Image (spheres, grey):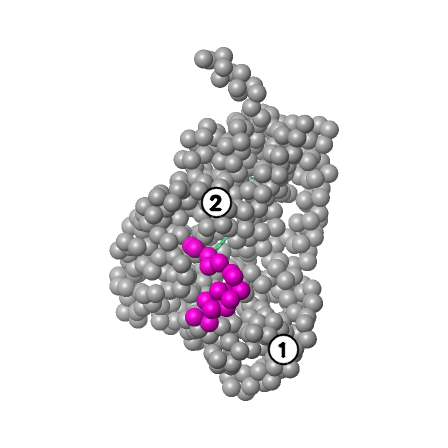
C-alpha cells in the first residue's frame, strides 16, 4: 500500500500557488482536483487575504469592507466556491437584488449607485443638462476625463465626476492620467431629468451610456428585454461574516490534500529552458519542485525572486482605512445592504450595513471605508467618522458606540493610471520571457479587481495551463 502511495506521489505533477486569498485557494482546489500535488505559500499567518473578517473587543464580526460574493455562472466553480444546491440553501442567504444607494451633496438617493445630478445647485444642474443633451456623438476617448467631458459635459465633469475621482484616487490625481479602468464605481453614469424621460432616453444607446434608471422596475424591465440574467449574490448565514467562505475553502483544499504553508514566502525561483523548475522558501528553506505556478501575490516579487528587475513604471495603490463600529441602537437605514458616499465633504466612500445583510444579526454594526494615501491614515478618527455617519442619518443622533475596530489595509485599490497599466503589462511580459509555466492571476495581476472576475479568470487560466501540460 505504502509503495502505491509513493509511486503516486512520484507520478503526480507539482503545483505551487503563491498567495492564499480567494483566487489562490480556488486555484489550489482546481489543481488538486486535476491530481496535482499542491503547496500554497501564504505570507500572512492565515489564508483569506481581503476576504478575512475582523472582530472587535466584543467579538462582533466585520468584513474588510463590502464583500458580497455572487455566483459566477460557471457551475463547476460555483459548486467549489459555495457548495451543492442543498449546501447553499442551508449555509448561504441568497440575495437576488442588492439594495444600495448613494449620498451626494448632503442628500440620499436610494435607487442606484449613480450620483443624482438634481442635487446640485439649480444653476449648475440646468447648465449641465443643457450640455449633456447636446452631446450625442459616440465617444472613443482613452482617458476617463476626456470620455466623461464628451458624454456628460464640462459642468457635470467638474461638479460630479472629478470630485468623485479625486475622492477615490487622491486629491493630487490628474484625471487625464486615469484610464477607463477608473470607471470601477460606475461614475460614467448619473441620474438626471425625471424617471420617465430617463427611461425613454435610455432607449437610445448614446443616452443609455450616460444616464441611470430612476426606478428598479425600469432596470428589471430593461434586463429582461435584453436577456440579461439577474446576478444572484450570497452571504453566509453564520454570524461569522465572509470569513465563513475562507474557512470553507481552506477546509475544502486541505481535504483534497493541499499543503498550506503560512508565514512563508518564495525567496528564489529556479528556471530552466523557459520553465520554472523549483522555488525556494524563505523561512522553512524548503525547495519545492514545480510543473505549474499560480502567482496571486504582487508580480514584482516573482521577478525579484528570479533576479529580474521589475518595470520601473509607477504603480500606486490606495490604502483603506476601515472603521468597524457597533452601536447600542438600530441603524436608521433598515434596508440597504451597502451604500456609496460620493459627497466631497465626507471622507467615507462606502458603508456596509450588516443588520440588513446577516439574517440573524443581533448587533447594530457597520463598516465605513475611506481611501487615502499611506501617510493619511491618522487623519480619520473614529469620532470624526461617527459624526459623519450621524450627519448622514445612518446612525441615530443619540446612538452610542459599544465596540469598534480600526482596520488599515495597504495596497488595496490600484490607482488606474496609464503608468499602472504600463507596469502591469511590462511585469507580465518580463515574467513570460522567463517562464511559460507561471500563471499571473488574482487582483494583484492588475487584470481584474472584482471577486467574481478574478475567480473566473483563475478558473480559465488553470484550465488552459493544465490542458497545455497534458498535451503530448
Ligand atoms: C476595501 C476593499 C473592498 C472591496 N470590495 C469589493 C466588492 O465590493 N466586490 C468585489 O467583487 N470585490 C471587492 N474587492 C476586491 C476583492 O477583495 C478582490 O477581488 C479579492 O479579494 C481578490 O482576491 P485575491 O486572492 O486575488 O487577492 P487577495 O485577497 O489580496 O489575496 C492575496 C494573498 O496573497 C498574499 N500575499 C501577498 N504577498 C505575498 C507574497 N509575497 N508571498 C505569499 N503570499 C503573499 C496575501 O497575504 C493574501 O493572502 C474589495 C477590495 C478591497 C480592498
Is the CB atom of the residue marked by disc 1 within 8 angstroms of ligand 1's nearest atom?
no
Return the residue nearer the eye: 199 or 401. 199
**Would you identify the image quadrant in which residue 136 lies?**
bottom right
When asked about the image quadrant of residue 14, the answer is top right
Say whether residue 399 is visible.
yes
Residue 46's tag is none
The image's mark for residue 75 is 2
Badge 1 marks a residue whose secondary structure is loop
Indicate the secondary structure of the residue bearing disc 2. Answer: helix
Q: Is residue 346 visible from the viewing direction of this image?
A: no
Q: Is mark 2 within 8 Å of ligand 1?
A: no
Q: What residue span does the magenta drawing correspond to?
A: 217-233
Residue 153: numbered disc: 1
Image quadrant in which the N terminus is located: top left
Q: Is residue 28 left or right of residue 397?
A: right
Q: Is residue 219 magenta?
A: yes
Q: Earlier in the sequence, mark 1 or mark 2?
A: 2
Q: State which quarter of the image contains the C terminus.
A: top right
Q: Is residue 215 above or below residue 86?
A: below
Amino acid at each position: 500500500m505504502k509503495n502505491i502511495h509513493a509511486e503516486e506521489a512520484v507520478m503526480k505533477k507539482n503545483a505551487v500557488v503563491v498567495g492564499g486569498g480567494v483566487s489562490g485557494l480556488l486555484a489550489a482546489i482546481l489543481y488538486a482536483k486535476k491530481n496535482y500535488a499542491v503547496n500554497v505559500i501564504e505570507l500572512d499567518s492565515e489564508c483569506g487575504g481581503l476576504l478575512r473578517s475582523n472582530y472587535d473587543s466584543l467579538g462582533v464580526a466585520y468584513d474588510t469592507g463590502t464583500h458580497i460574493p455572487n455566483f459566477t455562472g460557471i457551475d463547476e466553480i460555483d459548486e467549489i466556491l459555495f457548495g451543492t444546491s442543498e449546501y447553499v440553501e442551508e449555509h448561504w442567504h441568497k440575495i437576488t437584488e442588492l439594495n444600495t444607494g448613494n449620498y451626494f451633496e448632503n442628500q440620499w438617493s436610494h435607487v442606484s449607485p449613480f450620483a443624482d445630478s438634481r442635487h446640485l445647485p439649480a444653476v449648475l444642474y440646468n447648465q449641465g443638462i443643457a450640455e449633456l443633451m447636446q452631446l450625442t456623438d459616440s465617444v472613443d476617448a482613452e482617458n476617463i476625463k476626456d470620455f466623461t467631458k464628451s458624454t456628460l459635459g464640462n459642468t457635470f465633469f467638474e461638479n460630479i465626476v472629478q470630485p468623485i475621482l479625486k475622492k477615490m484616487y487622491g486629491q493630487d490625481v490628474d484625471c487625464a492620467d486615469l484610464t477607463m479602468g477608473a470607471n470601477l464605481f460606475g461614475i460614467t453614469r448619473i441620474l438626471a431629468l425625471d424617471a420617465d424621460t430617463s427611461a425613454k432616453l435610455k432607449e437610445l444607446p448614446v443616452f443609455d451610456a450616460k444616464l441611470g434608471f430612476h426606478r428598479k422596475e425600469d432596470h428589471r424591465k430593461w434586463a429582461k428585454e435584453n436577456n440579461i440574467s439577474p446576478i444572484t449574490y450570497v452571504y453566509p448565514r453564520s454570524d461569522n461574516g465572509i470569513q465563513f467562505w475562507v474557512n470553507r475553502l481552506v477546509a475544502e483544499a486541505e481535504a483534497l490534500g493541499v499543503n498550506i504553508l503560512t508565514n512563508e514566502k518564495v525567496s528564489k525561483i529556479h528556471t530552466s529552458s523557459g520553465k520554472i523548475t523549483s522555488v525556494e522558501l524563505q523561512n522553512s528553506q524548503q525547495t519545492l519542485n514545480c510543473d505549474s505556478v499560480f502567482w496571486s501575490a504582487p508580480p514584482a516579487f516573482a521577478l525579484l525572486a528570479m533576479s529580474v528587475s521589475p518595470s520601473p513604471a509607477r504603480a500606486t495603490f490606495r490604502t483603506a482605512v476601515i472603521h468597524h463600529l457597533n452601536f447600542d441602537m438600530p441603524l436608521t437605514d433598515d434596508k440597504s445592504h451597502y451604500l456609496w458616499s460620493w459627497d466631497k465633504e465626507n471622507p467615507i466612500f462606502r458603508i456596509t450595513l450588516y443588520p440588513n445583510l446577516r439574517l440573524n444579526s443581533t448587533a447594530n454594526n457597520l463598516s465605513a471605508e475611506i481611501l487615502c494615501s499611506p501617510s493619511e491614515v491618522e487623519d480619520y478618527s473614529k469620532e470624526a467618522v461617527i459624526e459623519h455617519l450621524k450627519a448622514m442619518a445612518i446612525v441615530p443622533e443619540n446612538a452610542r458606540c459599544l465596540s469598534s475596530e480600526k482596520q488599515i489595509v495597504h495596497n488595496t485599490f490600484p490607482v488606474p493610471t496609464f503608468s499602472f497599466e504600463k507596469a502591469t503589462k511590462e511585469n507580465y511580459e518580463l515574467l513570460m520571457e522567463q517562464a511559460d509555466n507561471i500563471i499571473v492571476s488574482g487582483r494583484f495581476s492588475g487584470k481584474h479587481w472584482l471577486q467574481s472576475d478574478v475567480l473566473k479568470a483563475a478558473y480559465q487560466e488553470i484550465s488552459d495551463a493544465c490542458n497545455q501540460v497534458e498535451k503530448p
